[in-house]
Amino acid sequence: MQFLTKNNFLHTARTTQNKKLSAWLLCAGTLLLPTSLIAGELTQYQASYDILRKGTNHGKAERELKKLNNNNYQVTYHSDIEWMIFSDSRQESSTFSFMNDKVEPIDYTMIRTGTGPDKKYEINFDRLTKTVTSNTSDYPLKCQWHDNFQDGISYQVQVREGLKKGKTSFSFPLVDKKGNCRDYDFEVVETEMISLPIGNVEAIKVKRLYDNDKRQALAWFAPEMDYMLVRMWKGEKGVEQFEVQMKSFTVINPPALPEEVKNEITPE
């Protein structure tokens, strides 16, 4: 883990020779990464990732979750990939409400630029009229309304909340970026120790369930880091398409540190 100050917590799992700091960092997930910083709220954070293909780095990604107002939050994901003559830049954003451990999307946006035509998708969830609209259609989408609807990235927040409660399977009615309504199903496979740029992390491995075995998608969430998404892997017919690995993690506005903890992490 990298150095910690009372104003900014950059959580990494790197080895340190300071024995006091090492011992304290082992329980950092308990002290500074509770289920939420305030009861009923989500932890706000920033995280960065490496994007790899067959072990070679071909890009980077940034993920952020922040509170907007009242019970509303926004999660964003921005990736940039360069591979041979191919380039791809994507910005995804989901605004959602969070109450009683339930994520309810309000709107979703995805902007893609790079090789080939640029694209922009916008999805809006109107809970008053129980309709879903898209910028690609003049009319509401033909989706039967469901109170548990998720969008292309809000479901990842809901998976985290479910894992905190010990759930081992998940199913979400989801509206994707193109306005297609489909079910996303997941199951917990196992808990394992994985090696990442931030160090060795114990993580819960979650598998997406498809109708056939042509595609594979796996995600790893680290309990000691408030169940943050630390790794993703996607393949098709057993061949890796890409892998995403966390390389840094920062909690925004962490709670004040106890004096004894401050003393232990102060350089001698």
Image: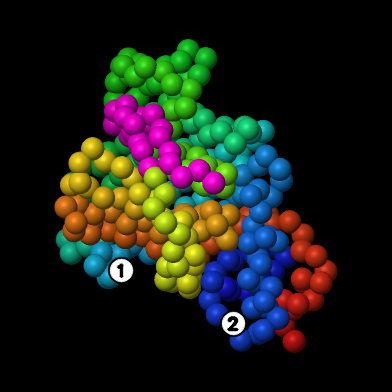
Q: Which residue has dot 2 on it?
A: 16
Marker disc for residue 57 = 1
Marker disc for residue 192 = none
Residue 177 belongs to magenta span: yes
The quadrant holding residue 86 is bottom left
Q: Is residue 155 left or right of residue 102?
A: left
SS category of the residue bearing label 1: strand
Q: Is any part of residue 79 visible from this angle? A: no
Highlighted range, magenta: 166-186
The chief SS type of the magenta part is strand
The type of residue carrying mark 2 is Thr
Q: Quadrant of the N terminus?
A: bottom right
SS category of the residue bearing label 2: loop
The foreground one among 266 and 15 is 15
Residue 98 sits above or below residue 52 on the image: above
Which residue is found at the position 39% from the left and 45% from the top?
Answer: 187
Q: Tag 1 or tag 2, which sits nearer the N-term?
A: 2
Q: Quadrant of the C terminus?
A: bottom right
The foreground one among 236 and 49 is 236
Which residue is found at the position 50% from the left and 43% from the top?
Answer: 167
Whole-percent x, y for residue 67 in the image: 61, 42
The quadrant holding residue 242 is bottom left
The quadrant holding residue 84 is bottom left
The foreground one among 224 and 17 is 224
> How far separated are the C-alphas under marks 2 and 1?
26 Å
Q: Is residue 206 left or right of residue 45?
A: left
Q: Residues within 10 Å of mark 2 (few under 14, many from 20)?
A: some
Whole-percent x, y for residue 192 in the image: 44, 64
Residue 170 belongs to magenta span: yes
Whole-percent x, y for residue 173 in the image: 39, 29
Which residue is found at the position 65% from the left and 42% from the top?
Answer: 41
**Of marks 2 and 1, the one in the foreground:** 2
